[in-house]
Image: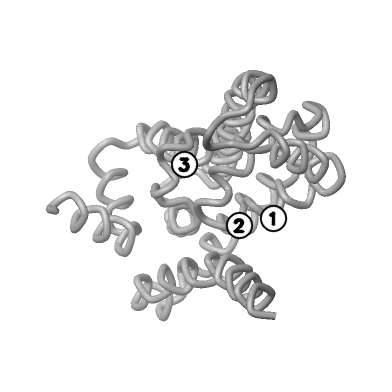
Amino acid sequence: MEWLGWFLDFVLHIDAHLTSFIAQYGVWVYAFLFVIVFCETGLVVTPFLPGDSLLFASGVAAGTGLCEPWLIFLVLLLAGILGDACNYTIGRHVGPVIFQRETRFIKKAYLLKAHAFYERHGGKAIILARFIPVVRTFAPFVAGIALMQPVKFLVFNFTGCLLWVGSLVAAGYFLGSLPWVKAHFSLIVYAIIAVSLLPLVLGYLQNRLRQKS
């Protein structure tokens, strides 16, 4: 369980770890950030990687002059866009196989409903999913399985990633120099995680109330 303790420490004190990484490896921090964001958004097996807190900490690092703000922004933006595109492509290749036959775990009727949902509301789902941990990892994969139109996915993928990266990096950049933020960074990470998970909790509670009614 040592790795779990290390991971929690990394997430809660990601600013200190990021500063240490920059001091030790310099420009390699850009590759490091790219890989983490790409894997968190592009691989369905790594939804646990830090996303929101990493973007905020990257903005803090840029605001303190440890790295170039525009380069950080472009690297993270590219990683998020390519990550979702990769996830979507994998889902799109898996989708036709699943559509052709009924499986024990995935019903064709559910996929048809998902396809209709993404054709009608897919844009909002892709954009909003960017701000919800775990969901943002699976949303592009499901969109690919549901055979959402590639051009439509590309437009909303770019829009969602621009809003996600832009807002969190900018927040870290402009707020990270404040003494209170520096002194309570772990508390801010908790707040970011809590706010990000709030839609999931509300959705779960709504479903429970509907089931009871």
Indicate the secondary structure of the residue bearing disc 3. Answer: helix
Circle 1: residue type? Leu
Q: Which residue is label 1 attached to? A: 128
Q: Which residue is label 3 attached to? A: 40
- Give the quarter of the image for residue 45: top left
The CA distance from mark 2 to mark 1 is 6 Å
Question: Does the CB distance between marks 2 and 1 fall below 8 Å?
Answer: yes
How many numbered marks does the figure carry? 3
Image coordinates for residue 52, horizontal then vertical, percent: 50, 56
Q: Image height check: is 206 above or below 95?
A: below
Circle 2: residue type? Phe
Name the residue at 60% across, 50% down: 165
For marks 3 and 2 on the same chain, the one whose residue lies earlier in the sequence: 3
Question: Does the CB distance between marks 3 and 1 fall below 8 Å?
Answer: no
- The quarter of the image holding the C terminus is bottom right
Name the residue at 63% across, 27% down: 102
Circle 3: residue type? Glu
Residue placed farthest to the left in the image? 2
The CA distance from mark 3 to mark 2 is 13 Å
Of 201 and 85, the residue lying toward us: 201
Name the residue at 49% across, 68% down: 192
Q: Which residue is label 2 attached to? A: 131
Image coordinates for residue 13, horizontal then vertical, percent: 30, 62
The residue carrying pointer 1 sits among few (fewer than 14), some (14 to 19) or many (20 or more) residues within 10 Å by Cα, namely some
Image coordinates for residue 183, horizontal then vertical, percent: 34, 77
Image coordinates for residue 23, horizontal then vertical, percent: 26, 45
Q: Is residue 86 left or right of residue 17?
A: right
Of 123 and 189, the residue lying toward us: 123
The CA distance from mark 3 to mark 1 is 16 Å
